[in-house]
Amino acid sequence: MAQENGIASGLSYQYLSAVTFVAAGGIFYIVVAKLLSTSALGAISLLLAIASLMNVAFSFGFPAAATHFISFHLGTGDHNETRSVARKILVISVVLSLVSLAFTLVTARWFAILFFHNPYDTPLIEAASFYIAIGVLFGVLHGSALGFQMFRTDAIIYLSSASLSYIIGLVLLLVFHGIIYLIIGLTLSYMYGSAFYIFYVFIRKPKGRITSSKTSLPLILSYSWPVMLSGLIGYGSSYVDRFVVAYYLNLSTLGIYSFILLVSSSLSFLSGPITNVLVPKLSEYFSTDDRDKMTNGMNLSSIVTVLIYSPIAMGLAAVAPVALTLLARQIYASGYIALIILLGTSSIFVLGGVLSSVIYAIRKTRVYVVTTILTLASNVALSFLLIPRFGIMGAAVANSSVMIVTFIVLYHYAVRTKLKNFDWNTVLKLWFSSLVMFVMVTAERMLLGNFIHLLPLYVLSGVFYYWIAINLTRSLRSLKREEFLSYIPSRFSFRRIVSLFLVKAF
């Protein structure tokens, strides 16, 4: 099986898939926020949250395990073992998918009463059970494709199925006027996506022996169960603030806060593709014990992540009230301070995603259990302490603590105890440039007003301020110019544009 392992090419396709996913999701939530009530948006968010919880539980960490072990054995050149591991994990995941379907169908009424406070919403949960089951299988197939470093094929399949699932679901929702049809649309999208994955990843494989026992099931489980357990605890740590908002405030406020969280988390597409490529690459380097390549890969990925993510996050924070009014309605702008808190925190602590790639690659997945226990404790404590007094601003602070605690713990395990030499100098220069841009654009907005027709001016001003700051501070001087640019996709003259933008940054 040919590896599509060019980093620049892989990143370009992964970014195309991620941008499409966010754009489709953005269109979905914007339309829902504009046409439906805040309580309807809250109900949809709650249903998808339940589906996410079930997916985390029944995936059992196998998507991450597939990515790591397949890439690990690619690094050692043992192609028979890569196919054997992929088949073994796929068979187990099919069983888990069926178990998730049965479990959700049996407990549907209980979920409806507990979360929706209405047993008549049981059919929604029952419909979601099929979405959960196919999502479990889809996730493992996605992880397997990344493990084989089929970055282009994976991005194309993900783009045509998962990335378009929101659009298909939205069309059915608007035509048939029922949330259950949204779930049907999502399910169908992941079904044909899974079929494509099976065809390209497993059926179109080269002939040869695939039976091998080097990677035993206990070894896979020892890697995956901490991922699953930390995923469940992490789910609680990420969602507890929403449930506390619903408890102390009301469903309408939950709808506003949920939309703010969606806007904030939507920017994850800027760092997600880097992680998709980084995990299999670091796993490959780990198989040959090449610590220098792992350190260089971590630092370069951190720099690229902050270079791309931080200015966009801080720029969006600078125009938060305008953006919320544009994306939804004026009522949502009341939560702009919460959005600023979330985006400001993520602008630097987004690097937790890069550090998590290191943890996955070196098989220290039990670290995630420690991480998520601490994040759950911080979010629970701060939620009950701050939300009754400060509302969704307090919820944003509590939610932001998850990113901060995650970063601190992963940094300790990934850098201080394993790889060393984290390039803080470059990272902080880039972040400082974004901070300068945020301050300047915020001052401009406060002077001229929160008017939608001024948004293009604020965007252009932000680009100008960031360009000045990043070049004046010589933010990338620790890097070799040509080596850095070699990782930038050359399509559509993108590499040339980046080179001109960073003309004095090296």
Image: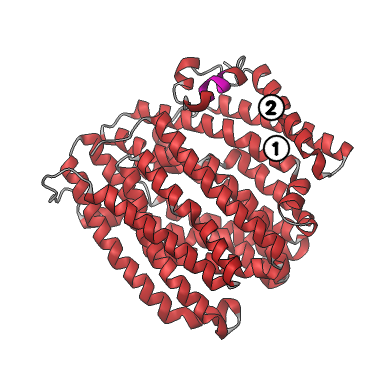
Callout 2 environment at 10 Å: few (<14), some (14 to 19), or many (20+)?
Answer: many
Asked which colour scheme the image uses, the reply is secondary structure
Residue 362 is drawn in which quadrant?
top left
- How many numbered callouts? 2
In front here: 260 or 497?
Answer: 497
Instruction: Give the residue number, with chain letter if any, for mark 1.
Output: 315
Q: Is residue 495 magenta?
A: yes
Q: Is residue 176 left or right of residue 67?
A: right
Q: SS class of the residue under badge 2? A: helix
Q: Amino acid at mark 2?
A: Tyr
Residue drawn at the location 45% of the way across and 25% of the way down:
487
Percent position of residue 251, x then y: 69, 71
In front here: 322 or 400?
Answer: 322
Residue drawn at the location 62% of the way across and 14% of the way down:
504
Can residue 112 be seen from the camera position used here?
A: yes
- For marks 2 and 1, give the CA distance: 9 Å
Q: Is residue 357 left or right of residue 218?
A: right
Secondary structure of the magenta portion, mostly?
A: helix
Q: Quadrant of the C terminus?
A: top right
Callout 1 environment at 10 Å: few (<14), some (14 to 19), or many (20+)?
Answer: many
Instruction: Give the residue number, with chain letter if any, for mark 2.
Output: 466
Percent position of residue 152, x then y: 38, 39
> Magenta residues, as a range?
494-499
Percent position of residue 127, x then y: 46, 74
Residue 276 is drawn in which quadrant?
top left
Percent position of residue 479, x then y: 50, 18
Whether label 2 touches label 1, CB < 8 Å: yes
The residue most toward the bottom is 119
Q: Amino acid at mark 1?
A: Gly
Label whose residue precedes the other's in the sequence (2 or 1):
1
Can residue 62 be seen from the camera position used here?
A: no
Residue drawn at the location 73% of the way across and 34% of the way down:
459
